[in-house]
Image: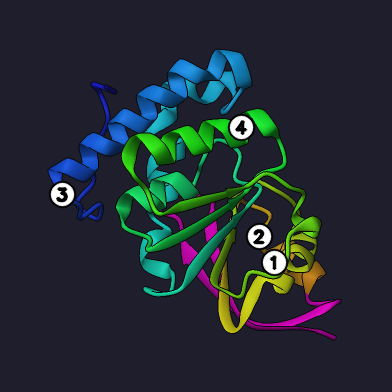
Amino acid sequence: MIMDRDIPDWLNVSRETIERLEHYAAEVLRWNPAINLVSKPSIPLLWQRHILDSAQLFPLASPTGIWADLGAGGGFPGIVLAIMGAPQMVLIESDQRKASFLREMARQMSLPVRVVAKRIDAVEPLGAETVSARALASLTELLGHATPHLAPHGRAIFPKGRGVEEELARAQADWIFDATRIPSRTDPEAAILMLENIRRR
């Protein structure tokens, strides 16, 4: 259990969900020395930087359909979102050890999660209502990865850091989309991009 974790007012979930998030955090810490799920410097800030940073994405997605998380890594945000109630989570992670960890978390907590241990470009189109990716690639690259897996009216959700405006400008050279910038609840210099009606120029 993470004893000094803060539970902000906006994290409107049940006590049981908090306990499941704490269990997941403890498992990340237990597995991390073997497969490097999160960076060492971020371990003391695991709750704020990884758990809460992932949890804030939950209200932004479609309440139905598949949510696909690309480059799922240690399960941020995918496992967090499944714990919070995402109905159908597909986690794409090519690293076999991380994929094994994700499957074990889904098994332990009976989560509605399917893990696909392949490269993103080798996965058949998913028709997802929501596609996310966290700390994976530039926005231009992310759109190339995400669009094959999005349903026609789906949305992409990408947390971004202080360079968000520059990334948007670069992406708009190759892509057309409707963008909504949402201030991050966990980092004053970060934002979440919610993109819809995405198409190539």
Reading the image, the residue beneath label 4 is 98
Residue 86 in view, yes or no: yes
Of callouts 1 and 4, which one flags the residue occurring earlier in the amino acid sequence? 4
Q: Which residues are magenta?
A: 172-201
In the image, residue 21 lies at what x, y percent?
A: 31, 37
CA gap between label 3 and label 2 equals 33 Å
Q: Nearer the viewer, mark 4 or mark 3?
A: 4
Q: Residues within 10 Å of mark 4 (few under 14, many from 20)?
A: many
Disc 1 secondary structure class:
helix
Point 70% across, 35% down: residue: 95
Q: Residues within 10 Å of mark 2 (few under 14, many from 20)?
A: some
Of callouts 3 and 2, which one flags the residue occurring earlier in the amino acid sequence? 3
In the image, residue 186 lies at what x, y percent?
A: 41, 46
Q: Nearer the viewer, residue 100 or 30?
A: 100
Residue 187 in view, yes or no: no
Point 48% across, 48% down: residue: 77
Q: Residue furthest left?
A: 15
Reading the image, the residue beneath label 3 is 14
Left or right, 95 with reference to 121: left
Reading the image, the residue beneath label 2 is 164
Point 75% across, 55% down: residue: 120
From this view, report whether residue 113 is shown above or below residue 48. Answer: below
Q: Residues within 10 Å of mark 3 (few under 14, many from 20)?
A: few
Q: Nearer the viewer, residue 117 or 45?
A: 117
In the image, residue 58 lies at what x, y percent?
A: 38, 60
Asked if disc 3 and disc 2 are in contact, CB closer than 8 Å, the reply is no
* Amino acid type, residue under disc 2 in the picture: Val
Disc 4 secondary structure class:
helix
CA gap between label 1 and label 4 equals 21 Å
Of callouts 1 and 2, which one flags the residue occurring earlier in the amino acid sequence? 1
CA gap between label 3 and label 1 equals 32 Å
* Amino acid type, residue under disc 3 in the picture: Ser
